[in-house]
């Protein structure tokens, strides 16, 4: 059995994806699905819990806007019933889910994870201004679709975290919807993690058949180009960090202890779990806990987006995470 499938989109990728999701909902015995929609906020797109297949028409995976890491919404969800839940996740959201699962903060039981290639996101203000200036709602969705084949919207317009994103394709999810490098108005890829998932969900019937090796390789090559470009950008951002900013974990702890205590950056982090809180007067183990948090950083940039002082937190965490990982490896 195959694990790579092609889905024809007939010049309307959003509707094609919605139809696929409706079928997956039915085949997967899904009761609720977390997906980015405009339901709660017509001007923007946010992770929303959907409770019926009809609502899937509102899903917009291409809008270049990320107001919140969906892993936070997933972790907050109260006890699930006996049926399945689904979750549509950007790559950095999938990484956060994987971290929460590893730490047993979230269970994969009866949860179908559907990741999708990220075409990057813009700062919210920039997104809203351009939607209005350039022709109204969903203008930016159209622009993202236009640039999918080249690897996303012109990089310099993206959020800084997205410009430096280490991996814009999802990992450890059940199904991946592949957009990068694809002629999305004609076709996209549907990739199952393993054959058993393809079989259980009937991907052979829900798609237009096996994907050609050439199509799969085109996506792989485009992703490699985006990753290399983003790595260069990340290194540039790190080099540009001010010398006053923390250069190790202890300095970071002191920095947060002295920062204006709004906590907005920490509240917006899907994988933060109180690591900066001192557990005892002598703060035993705090550096190790903070190091673990930094090493697990998924690069979503939600902390930076929330910071009222506009601190370059994503680049700062990237620099410190590299140091922590080196210590763990050696
Ligand atoms: S950090 Fe990466 S995966 Fe997350 S929104 Fe930006 S480009 Fe997409
Ligand atoms: S520290 Fe910032 S970039 Fe890293 S996972 Fe948390 S919110 Fe995302």
Image (tube, rainbow, N blue to C red):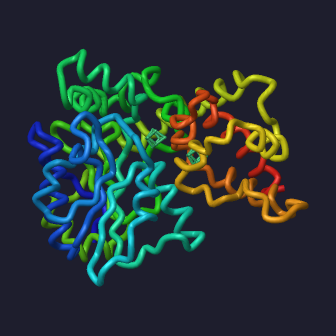
Residue 210 percent across, percent down from the top left? 22, 58
**Total labels drawn:** 0
Between 210 and 298, the residue placed more toward the observer is 298
Residue at the front extreme?
Answer: 261
Q: Is residue 166 above or below residue 295?
A: above
Q: Is residue 214 at all visible to an observer of this figure? A: no
Position of residue 120 in the picture relative to residue 253 (left or right) = left
Residue 124 percent across, percent down from the top left? 39, 30
Residue at screen point 51% across, 35% down: 305
Q: Is residue 10 above or below residue 24?
A: above
Image quadrant occupied by the C terminus? bottom right
Position of residue 232 in the picture relative to residue 54 (left or right) = right
Residue at screen point 24% across, 57% down: 5
Residue at the right extreme?
Answer: 282
Q: Is residue 7 at all visible to an observer of this figure? A: yes
Between 169 and 142, the residue placed more toward the observer is 142
- Determine which quarter of the picture holds residue 288: bottom right
Residue at screen point 39% across, 67% down: 77
- Determine which quarter of the picture holds residue 83: bottom left
Position of residue 113 in the picture relative to residue 290 (left or right) = left
Image quadrant occupied by the N terminus? bottom left
Residue 125 percent across, percent down from the top left? 39, 25
Residue at screen point 51% across, 63% down: 98
Position of residue 228 in the picture relative to residue 289 (left or right) = left
Residue 84 percent across, percent down from the top left? 28, 75
């Amino acid at each position: 059995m195959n694990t790579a499938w092609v889905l024809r989109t007939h010049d309307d990728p959003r509707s094609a994806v919605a139809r696929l999701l409706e079928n997956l909902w039915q085949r997967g015995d899904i009761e609720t699905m977390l997906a980015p929609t405009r339901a709660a906020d017509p001007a923007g797109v946010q992770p929303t819990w959907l409770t019926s297949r009809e609502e899937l028409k509102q899903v917009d995976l291409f809008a270049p806007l990320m107001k919140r890491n969906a892993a936070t919404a997933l972790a907050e969800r109260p006890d699930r019933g006996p049926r399945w839940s689904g979750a549509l996740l950007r790559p950095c959201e999938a990484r956060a889910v994987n971290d929460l699962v590893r730490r047993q903060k979230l269970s994969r039981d009866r949860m179908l994870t559907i990741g999708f290639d990220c075409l990057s996101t813009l700062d919210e203000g920039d997104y809203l201004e351009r939607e209005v200036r350039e022709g109204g709602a969903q203008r930016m969705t159209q622009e993202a679709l236009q640039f999918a084949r080249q690897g996303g919207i012109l990089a310099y317009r993206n959020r800084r975290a997205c410009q430096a994103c280490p991996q814009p394709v999802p990992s450890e999810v059940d199904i991946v919807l592949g957009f990068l490098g694809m002629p999305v108005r004609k076709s996209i890829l549907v990739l199952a993690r393993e054959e058993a998932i393809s079989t259980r969900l009937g991907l052979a019937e829900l798609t237009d058949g096996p994907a050609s090796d050439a199509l799969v390789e085109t996506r792989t090559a485009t992703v490699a180009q985006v990753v290399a470009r983003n790595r260069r950008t990340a290194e540039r951002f790190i080099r540009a960090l001010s010398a006053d900013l923390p250069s190790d974990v202890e300095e970071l702890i002191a920095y947060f202890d002295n920062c204006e205590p709004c906590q907005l950056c920490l509240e917006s982090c899907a994988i933060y779990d109180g690591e900066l809180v001192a557990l005892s007067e002598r703060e035993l183990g705090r550096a190790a806990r903070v190091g673990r948090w930094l090493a697990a950083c998924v690069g979503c940039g939600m902390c930076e987006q929330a910071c009222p002082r506009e601190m370059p937190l994503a680049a700062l965490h990237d620099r410190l995470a590299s140091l922590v990982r080196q210590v763990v490896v050696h």
